Amino acid sequence: MKKHIPNLLTFGNLFCGFLAIIYIINGDMRNAPILIFIAIMLDAVDGRVARILGVSNEMGKELDSLADIVSFGVVPALLVVYTYFSDFGMVGIVFAGLFPLFGAYRLARFNISDQSESLKFFKGIPITLAGGIVTFLVLFSKTIPVWLFAIIFYLLAILMVSRMRIPSFKKIGLPKYSILITLFLFYMVYLFARTRFEQVPVFFYVALATYILYVVVRFFKEKEPRFPMRRRKLPKRFKWKLRKK
């Protein structure tokens, strides 16, 4: 049973992407970004849960990539079409569609690359980080001008497929995507403060529950030994006796 738990978290990531698409089509731009950030938290813990339970496998990695292309490639691009590029018609749709295409290429390249390299650095920024940044910027679509967003949007797309080496978060000791999640929580607190209680988006409470799961998994992950235990050195008198024999 435990071997299916990480896959359930990955399926949760994918289902959040599906629900976000439905909300975007229906014009709900409050719950859709929250669902993407819930997907980010689920993506940040599914691999850790697999390693904690000792059930990591290739199928889980492939499922993770399939979920990521939807939640952090297709959905952010769709958000952009309905917000920043809404006045550009088919041209806006075509240009926004480049983002998931670049993201898919980045994921495919990652899957066939040497996995040991990812412990040291990334080749191009991860699609989760790029999609998360795009989603966060969409929250301020009424403040950030279109031209500035377009530059950032295409810069992120290019950085995904670039071969620029970016230090891995695993080596510098930062929680995975912690900055994005912190920014999201600050935004939600701001939203909660400026609106009445009944106007808080429905998935705000789901996001809080997911964040608690994220913190718990991080806590248990930190409990794992990071370094192999050193062999204790024998006292000199024991070494002398061994040599004598």
Image (tube, rainbow, N blue to C red):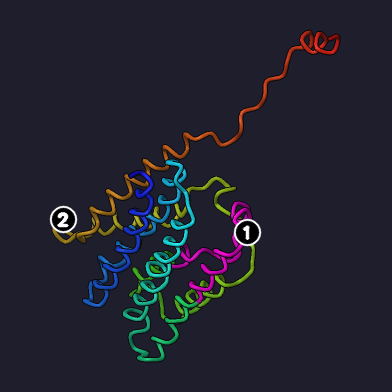
Above/below status of 44 relative to 107: above
Check if mark 1's residue and mark 2's residue have beta carbons within 8 Å.
no
- Does 80 sit left or right of 112 as displayed? left
* Residue nearest the viewer, comparing 77 with 2: 2
| Dominant SS in magenta | helix
Q: Position of residue 177 (x, y in %)?
A: 46, 55
Asked if residue 62 is among those painted magenta in the image, a careful observer would answer no
Would residue 148 be seen by someone viewing this image from the given angle?
no
Three-letter code for the amino acid on which mark 2 is drawn: Phe
* Residue nearest the viewer, comparing 194 with 7: 7
Q: Position of residue 74 (x, y in %)?
A: 39, 74
**Magenta residues (range):** 102-131
* Residue nearest the viewer, comparing 92 with 12: 12
Identify the mark at residue 197; answer none if there is no mark: 2
Three-letter code for the amino acid on which mark 1 is drawn: Asp
Quarter of the rendering occupied by the C terminus: top right
- Does 130 sit left or right of 39 as displayed? right
Residue at the (21%, 61%) spot, across then down:
201
Q: Position of residue 78 (x, y in %)?
A: 35, 77
Badge 2 crowding class, 10 Å Cα cut-off, few under 14, some 14 to 19, many 20 or more, is few
Identify the mark at residue 114; answer none if there is no mark: 1
* Residue nearest the viewer, comparing 223 with 164: 223
Residue at the (45%, 40%) spot, across then down:
221
Above/below status of 173 relative to 36: above
Identify the mark at residue 19; answer none if there is no mark: none
Quarter of the rendering occupied by the N terminus: top left
- Disc 1 or 2, which lies upstream in sequence? 1
Q: Secondary structure at mark 2?
A: helix
Residue at the (45%, 75%) spot, across then down:
100
